Image (cartoon, helix red, strand yellow):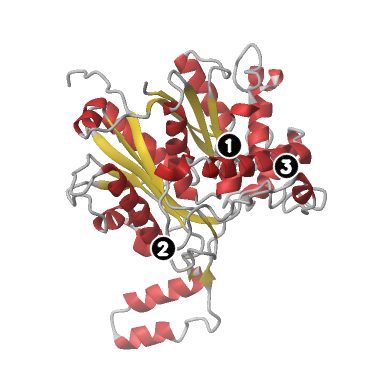
C-alpha cells in the first residue's frame, strides 16, 4: 500500500436531547427513540436529509437484546440516506468518546469524508433477563428433541423466578464505581469541601450557559424537556453541605450532589474533512488533533494509583508527550465529572511529584491547571451522565467553545468503568 497523508478531522457541530434523571421524563423512552431524536435534530440542523454519510458510529452501555444493532435501527428512523453504514461501539462511560475517535480515524485515513459519532443510554429501561438457573433450564427445554424430553426438562424449571438484574458493580471487585472511587479519593486526601465546590461550579456554569443561549444550537427539546432536568438552579453551598454521604460510609465525603446520578439521554456529533464541510457550506468548529485510550489494573493494583477511574491520568500524560505539550497549554479542560472525587484525584495525581516520577516516569509533576477553565459550561454533575451520550455532549460543547476563541486548545478527559479511559486534544478550526 502506498502511504497516504492523514487528513485533518473537524468537528462541525452537534446535537443532543436534554438529559433526564432515571425513571423520570423518559420513563417510556428507549435507547432507540432517544438516539433517533438526537440524530433527527442533527439532520435538521445541518440539512442532511437523504445525505449519504461515510459512517455513523454509536452505542450504549445498558442495552437490551433488541439493541444489538442500535445505531443502524436508529438511523433507519431518520431522514439520513439508508446507504449510510453504521457500527456499534461500547466502552463503558467512554462509549461516546470512542465513537468520536472511530469516526475521526476513518476520516483521517481518507476512508470516509464525513460521519457522525453518537450514543445513548437509559437506566429507565433496564435489560432485566432470566438468571442462570432459569435460563439454563429453558435452554435445555428448547434443545430437547422430543416432546417427552421437553416435558422432563420442563418439570425441573425452578418454582421461584430467577432474574438477572443489571448492576454497575465491577464483576472483578464487586464494587460499584462510587465505592471504589471513595477509596481512591481518600488515598489522595480529597476533601468534602473541594468536591462540593466542583458540584456547585458545575450547576452554576450549566445554568449560565443555558441562560446565555449557548445550547440553542446544540440541543433539541424532547419528551417535554427543554433543558437537563438534573440542573439545580440557585444551588447553594449550604444545601450541598447538608447532604449525607452516599459512598465511603458514614464518614465519607461523596454525596448525591458531588456524584453523578443515573441518567437517560442521547447525543450526536457531526464530523468531516474541510473539503466536505465546504461542499455543504458548513463552518468547522474545531480540529481533533489527537486521542489516547488507556487502561489500569484496578483489580490487583494500588487503588491510589490504579483506581478504577484513574486511567485518564496516564492517557493524558501520553497525549502530552506525543504532542510536545504541557498540562498548562490549554484554554479549556473538559474532565468528565463521574464524581467530583475522580476529577480531584486526577488533578492531585498530575500535581504530585512522586507519582509523576514513579508512575509516569517524569522528572517532576505535570503541575496544576487553571480551575476557572474547567468545565466552563457545566459538567456531568449538573447535566447528568447517560453513559453512552456523555462523550458526544463533551465534544460538541468544547468544539463550540473553541470556535468562539480562535487559536485556542482544549483537553478532554473521560474516565470509564473497568479501569479505562479515552482522552483527546482539540483546537479551534480558525
Marks 1, 3: nearer the viewer: 3
**Could you tell me which secondary element the residue under label 1 belongs to?**
loop
Quick check: 49 left or right of 195?
left
How far apart are the two marked residues, 1 and 3, measured between alpha carbons? 29 Å
Categorize mark 3 by other alpha carbons within 10 Å: few (<14), some (14-19), many (20+): many
Categorize mark 2 by other alpha carbons within 10 Å: few (<14), some (14-19), many (20+): many
Q: Please state the horizontal and vertical placement of residue 140, each as a whole percent of the image.
A: 38, 75
- Does residue 416 appear anywhere in the picture? no
Residue 30's disc is 2
Residue 400, quarter of picture: top left
- Does residue 195 appear anywhere in the picture? yes
* Residue position for label 1: 297
How far apart are the two marked residues, 3 and 2, measured between alpha carbons? 32 Å
Q: Please state the horizontal and vertical placement of residue 80, each as a whole percent of the image.
A: 22, 50
* Residue position for label 3: 196
Q: Residue at x 44, y 76 (%)?
A: 137
Q: Is residue 24 above or below residue 401?
A: below
Q: Earlier in the sequence, mark 1 or mark 3?
A: 3
Q: Quadrant of the C terminus?
A: top left
How far apart are the two marked residues, 1 and 2, measured between alpha carbons? 34 Å
**Could you tell me which secondary element the residue under label 2 belongs to?**
loop
Count of labels shown?
A: 3
Q: Residue at x 41, y 27 (%)?
A: 403
Amino acid at each position: 500500500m502506498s502511504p497516504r497523508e492523514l487528513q485533518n478531522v473537524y468537528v462541525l457541530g452537534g446535537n443532543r436531547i436534554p438529559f433526564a434523571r432515571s425513571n423520570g421524563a423518559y420513563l417510556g423512552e428507549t435507547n432507540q427513540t432517544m438516539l433517533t431524536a438526537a440524530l433527527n435534530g442533527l439532520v435538521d440542523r445541518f440539512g442532511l436529509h437523504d445525505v449519504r454519510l461515510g459512517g455513523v458510529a454509536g452505542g450504549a452501555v445498558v442495552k437490551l437484546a433488541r439493541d444489538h444493532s442500535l445505531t443502524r435501527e436508529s438511523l433507519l428512523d431518520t431522514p439520513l440516506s439508508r446507504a449510510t453504514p453504521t457500527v456499534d461501539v461500547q466502552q463503558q462511560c467512554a462509549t461516546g468518546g470512542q465513537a468520536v475517535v472511530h469516526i475521526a480515524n476513518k476520516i483521517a485515513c481518507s476512508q470516509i469524508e464525513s460521519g457522525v459519532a453518537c450514543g445513548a443510554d437509559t437506566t429507565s429501561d433496564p435489560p432485566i433477563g432470566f438468571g442462570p438457573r432459569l435460563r439454563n433450564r429453558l435452554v435445555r427445554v428448547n434443545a430437547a428433541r422430543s416432546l417427552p424430553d421437553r416435558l422432563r426438562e420442563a418439570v425441573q424449571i425452578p418454582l421461584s423466578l430467577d432474574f438477572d438484574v443489571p448492576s454497575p458493580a465491577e464483576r472483578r471487585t464487586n464494587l460499584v464505581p462510587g465505592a471504589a472511587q471513595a477509596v481512591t479519593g481518600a488515598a489522595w486526601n480529597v476533601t468534602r469541601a473541594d468536591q462540593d465546590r466542583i458540584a456547585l461550579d458545575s450547576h452554576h456554569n450549566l445554568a449560565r450557559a443555558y441562560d446565555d443561549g449557548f445550547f440553542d444550537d446544540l440541543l433539541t427539546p424532547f419528551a417535554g424537556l427543554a433543558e437537563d432536568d438534573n440542573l439545580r438552579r440557585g444551588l447553594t453551598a449550604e444545601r450541598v453541605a447538608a447532604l449525607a454521604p452516599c459512598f465511603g460510609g458514614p464518614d465519607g465525603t461523596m454525596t448525591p450532589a458531588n456524584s453523578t446520578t443515573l441518567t437517560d439521554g442521547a447525543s450526536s456529533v457531526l464530523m468531516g474533512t474541510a473539503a466536505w464541510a465546504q461542499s455543504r457550506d458548513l463552518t468547522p468548529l474545531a480540529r481533533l488533533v489527537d486521542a489516547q485510550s488507556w487502561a489500569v489494573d484496578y483489580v490487583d493494583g494500588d487503588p491510589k494509583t490504579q483506581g478504577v477511574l484513574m486511567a485518564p491520568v496516564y492517557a493524558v500524560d501520553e497525549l502530552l508527550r506525543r504532542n510536545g505539550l504541557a498540562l498548562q497549554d490549554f484554554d479549556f479542560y473538559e474532565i468528565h465529572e463521574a464524581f467530583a472525587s475522580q476529577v480531584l484525584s486526577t488533578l492531585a495525581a498530575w500535581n504530585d511529584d512522586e507519582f509523576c516520577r514513579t508512575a509516569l516516569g517524569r522528572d517532576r509533576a505535570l503541575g496544576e491547571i487553571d480551575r476557572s477553565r474547567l468545565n466552563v459550561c457545566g459538567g456531568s454533575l449538573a447535566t447528568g451522565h447517560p453513559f453512552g451520550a456523555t462523550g458526544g455532549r463533551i465534544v460538541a460543547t468544547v468544539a463550540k467553545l473553541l470556535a468562539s476563541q480562535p487559536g485556542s486548545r482544549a483537553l478532554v478527559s473521560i474516565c470509564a468503568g473497568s479501569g479505562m479511559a479515552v482522552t483527546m486534544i482539540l483546537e479551534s478550526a480558525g
